[in-house]
């Protein structure tokens, strides 16, 4: 694992995308930035522009209006890039499962690296999910080297 | 040969290391002020290394050459300016006449580079940010130059940094006189504007125009911009120390004083950044052309009257 890969995992900048969520997951994401949880100690920052971001945090059920926009945002992210689905709606569409407006779950639209379930997930769960993502990437980098 | 060594070792390496450290100090102090833990010591370095690994995207419709050249111009100008400052600090007699003007000029170039990059990227939000940056430059440059004029008057109207340092070695530092104190205050406020930090971060307002001027930059180019900003966080306070506080002498206890002065200035900048809300661009203009310019004119008059 090179030093650049290590640096990548130590400074993940997240971009927060709400695809029509009820705002609960978004509030829990913002909770991660507050003094109690403070994800900046892991080097994570909230990026204002998608071109600065390493991780795309998606909340909410993916609806028809949002699908082309999610794809465009994903394509605009510079590689290497990671996607995290947060909350029941982003994972499986939740209560919108049978809605005419939500044809696909998120992982049928773009590849997802980590799923964080919950309605909404607690900030601890979000942080634990991100840590597992980092561990997973480390393990992958270790296995390809051998 | 010697000047090349100055350029690469002091102008780039030492400046970048201190700048990265200052950026960490700024973030850590911010975190402590907000009762958080804050990032680890090497975090600014990790950020830069990570950005070097990322893909560099050039937006469709951007002016390619300007878009690629702008960050390099900014970085090189900071390197030159810190080389001149270090050379002066090491030996005040070895520089040329009028280097103060060159330094003031080159300290402006990073902002110009940001404007060029913003306009070249062809993004409407970046253009908006760039036009705000132009107005910001227009606001802070007048009081900044008036504040430097105070130091020039104290050094018997010499526009050489070496003479300003020599005058301070003879008569004591400028900042302890009435005019020098006022000028130091004005210069610190203008530094806040030059670094585009809160309350004067209108060109980069994250919540309104999503990083404004830098919105389209990614990968290596963004890394160069970040390195440039971190190095400015060293160059500007160092310039203030040389002009008003008599420079940093690299020997024994003086080195400790110099370090404390530098850390103190960065801490003041950080505390200002954390205790103020962002101003609108017209409020910035009113603030700099109103009270701050008035203060700097008073400082110039006091300096002319030998106070």
Image (cartoon, rainbow, N blue to C red):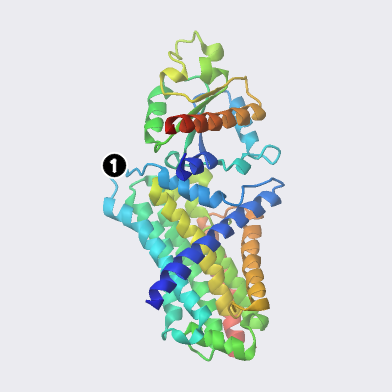
Residue B56 visible here:
yes
Q: In this view, does A114 lie to the left or right of A77?
A: right
Camera-side residue of B181 and B5: B5
**Residue displayed at 37% across by 46% down:** B124
Q: Is residue B231 left or right of residue B55?
A: right
Residue B215 visible here:
no
| In this view, B266 is above or below B242 | above
Relative image position of residue B2 (x, y in whole percent): 40, 77
The quarter of the picture where the C terminus of chain B appears is bottom right
Mark 1 lies on residue: B60
How many numbered badges does the structure rendering display? 1
Relative image position of residue B150 (x, y in whole percent): 56, 82
Relative image position of residue B209 (x, y in whole percent): 47, 45
| In this view, B54 is above or below B255 | above
Label 1 crowd (10 A; few <14 / some 14-19 / many >=20): few
**Residue displayed at 63% across by 77% down:** B182
Q: In this view, does A58 lie to the left or right of B65?
A: right
- Quarter where residue A77 is shown: top left
Camera-side residue of B47 and B63: B47
Q: Which chain does the numbered disc 1 sit on?
A: B
| In this view, A125 is above or below B89 | above
| In this view, A140 is above or below A63 | below
């Amino acid at each position: 694992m090179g030093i650049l890969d290590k640096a990548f995992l130590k400074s993940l900048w997240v971009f927060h995308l709400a695809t029509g969520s009820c705002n609960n997951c978004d509030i829990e994401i913002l909770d991660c930035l507050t003094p109690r949880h403070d994800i900046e100690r892991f080097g994570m920052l909230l990026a204002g522009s998608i071109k600065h971001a390493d991780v795309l945090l998606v909340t909410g059920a993916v609806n028809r209006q949002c699908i082309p926009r999610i794809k465009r945002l994903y394509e605009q992210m510079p590689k290497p890039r990671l996607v995290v689905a947060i909350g029941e709606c982003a994972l499986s569409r939740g209560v919108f499962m049978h809605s005419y407006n939500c044809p696909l779950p998120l992982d049928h639209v773009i590849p997802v690296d980590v799923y964080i379930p919950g309605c909404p997930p607690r900030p601890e769960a979000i942080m634990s999910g991100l840590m597992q993502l980092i561990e997973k990437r480390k393990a992958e980098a270790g296995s390809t080297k051998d | 040969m010697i000047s090349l060594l100055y350029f690469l070792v002091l102008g780039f390496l030492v400046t970048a290391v201190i700048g990265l450290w200052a950026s960490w100090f700024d973030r850590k102090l911010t975190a402590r002020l907000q009762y958080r833990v804050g990032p680890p010591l090497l975090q600014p370095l990790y950020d830069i290394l990570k950005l070097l690994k990322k893909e560099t995207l050039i937006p469709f419709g951007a002016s390619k050459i300007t878009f690629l050249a702008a960050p390099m111009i900014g970085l090189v100008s900071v390197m030159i300016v810190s080389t001149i400052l270090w050379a002066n600090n090491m030996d005040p007699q070895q520089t040329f006449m009028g280097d103060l003007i060159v330094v003031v000029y080159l300290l402006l170039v990073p902002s110009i580079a940001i404007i060029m990059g913003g306009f070249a990227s062809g993004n409407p939000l970046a253009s908006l940010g760039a036009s705000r940056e132009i107005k910001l430059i227009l606001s802070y440059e007048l009081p900044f130059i008036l504040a430097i004029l105070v130091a020039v008057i104290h050094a018997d109207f010499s526009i050489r940094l070496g003479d300003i340092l020599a005058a301070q070695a003879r008569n004591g530092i400028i900042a302890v006189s009435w005019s020098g104190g006022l000028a130091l205050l004005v210069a610190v406020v203008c530094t806040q504007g030059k670094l585009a930090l809160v309350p004067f971060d209108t060109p980069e307002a994250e919540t309104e125009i999503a990083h404004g001027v830098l919105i389209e930059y990614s990968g290596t180019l963004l890394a160069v911009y970040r390195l440039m900003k971190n190095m400015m966080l060293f160059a500007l306070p160092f310039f203030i120390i040389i002009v008003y506080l008599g420079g940093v002498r690299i020997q024994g206890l003086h080195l400790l004083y110099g370090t404390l002065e530098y850390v103190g200035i960065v801490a003041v900048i950080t505390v200002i950044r954390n205790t103020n809300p962002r101003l609108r661009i017209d409020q910035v203009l009113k603030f700099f052309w109103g009270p701050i310019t008035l203060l700097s004119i008073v400082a110039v008059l006091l300096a002319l009257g030998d106070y």
